[in-house]
Image: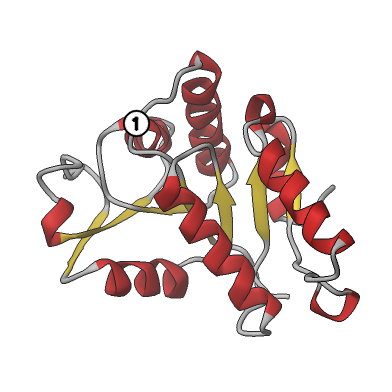
C-alpha cells in the first residue's frame, strides 16, 4: 500500500442544514493537519469546502485547491491555500484531484459530491486504483446511499467479484484512522 500523504475531500459548497456538518468539516481539517496529511479539495471558500480548507490552514496543515476557471467566482476561490491550481474544466480538475490524492473522503454534499465519490468508487471497482475511500456518514447523511448499495448487492448488480471497496466513518474522529488503516 502506498504511503498516505494527501487526502482529497469531496464535500458541499454549501454548509448544509445541520450545524453538525460544519463541525465535522472543522474537526476533519484539524485531524488532517495534525496527522500531517495535505488536503486536496475543490478550491472554493464557500460551505463545507471552505470550512475544511480553513481548518487545515488554521491548524498548520497544507492545502492544495483545484478549481475550474468558470467556478473561481461562483465558489469564491480560496486564495490563502498553499497551492492553487485553476483548470480549464471539471474533467481536468477531477483528474488532478485524483492524481494528487492518496485517499478520498466524502463529507456531506450535493450532486457534485455524490458524483465525485461514485466516480472514485467506480474506478476502484474497475481496478484503476487501490486508494482508500471513506464515506463520512455524519449524522447518517449517507445512509440512503448505503441502503442503495445494499439493494444493488441484493439485486446482484454489485456481485462479489465486483465488490466496491469503501469504508464508512460514523464519527469524524474515525476518518483519519480509517484512511491510515488504523481501525
The residue at the far front in this view is 155
- State the residue lying farthest toward the bottom: 127
Residue 144 versus residue 157 in the image, above or below: above
Question: Quick check: 114 left or right of 47?
Answer: right
Which image quarter holds the N terminus? bottom right
Q: Residue at x 45, y 43 (%)?
A: 11
Relative vertical location of residue 16 with respect to residue 10 in this rendering, above or below: above
Where does the image place residue 121, in percent across and percent down from the top left? 63, 67
Above or below residue 68? Residue 99 is below
Is 21 situated left or right of 82 in this image?
A: right
User: Residue 15's spot in the image, x, y percent?
Assistant: 39, 26
Question: Viewer-proximal residue, 143 or 152?
Answer: 152
Task: Kindly indicate the quadrant of the structure image that contains residue 144.
Answer: top right
- Position of 143 relative to 65 (above/below): above
**Which residue is more in the foreground, 148 or 124?**
148
At 58% across and 36% down in the image, what residue appears?
Answer: 31
Residue 20: x %, y % from top left: 55, 18
Residue neighbourhood size for the residue with mark 1, other residues' Cα within 10 Å, grouped as few (<14), some (14–19), many (≥20) = some
> At 45% across and 18% down in the image, what residue appears?
17
Amino acid at each position: 500500500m502506498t504511503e498516505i500523504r494527501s487526502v482529497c475531500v469531496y464535500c458541499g459548497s454549501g454548509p448544509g442544514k445541520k450545524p453538525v456538518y460544519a463541525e465535522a468539516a472543522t474537526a476533519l481539517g484539524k485531524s488532517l493537519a495534525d496527522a500531517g496529511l495535505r488536503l486536496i479539495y475543490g478550491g472554493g471558500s464557500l460551505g463545507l469546502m471552505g470550512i475544511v480548507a480553513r481548518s487545515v490552514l488554521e491548524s498548520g496543515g497544507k492545502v492544495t485547491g483545484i478549481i475550474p476557471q468558470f467556478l473561481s467566482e461562483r465558489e469564491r476561490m480560496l486564495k490563502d491555500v498553499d497551492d492553487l491550481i485553476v483548470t480549464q474544466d471539471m474533467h481536468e480538475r477531477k483528474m488532478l484531484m485524483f492524481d494528487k490524492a492518496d485517499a478520498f473522503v466524502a463529507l456531506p454534499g450535493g450532486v457534485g459530491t455524490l458524483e465525485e465519490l461514485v466516480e472514485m468508487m467506480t474506478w476502484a471497482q474497475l481496478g484503476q486504483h487501490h486508494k482508500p475511500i471513506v464515506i463520512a456518514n455524519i449524522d447518517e447523511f449517507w445512509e440512503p446511499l448505503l441502503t442503495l448499495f445494499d439493494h444493488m448487492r441484493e439485486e446482484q448488480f454489485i456481485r462479489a467479484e465486483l465488490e466496491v471497496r469503501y469504508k464508512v466513518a460514523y464519527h469524524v474522529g474515525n476518518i483519519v484512522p480509517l484512511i491510515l488503516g488504523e481501525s
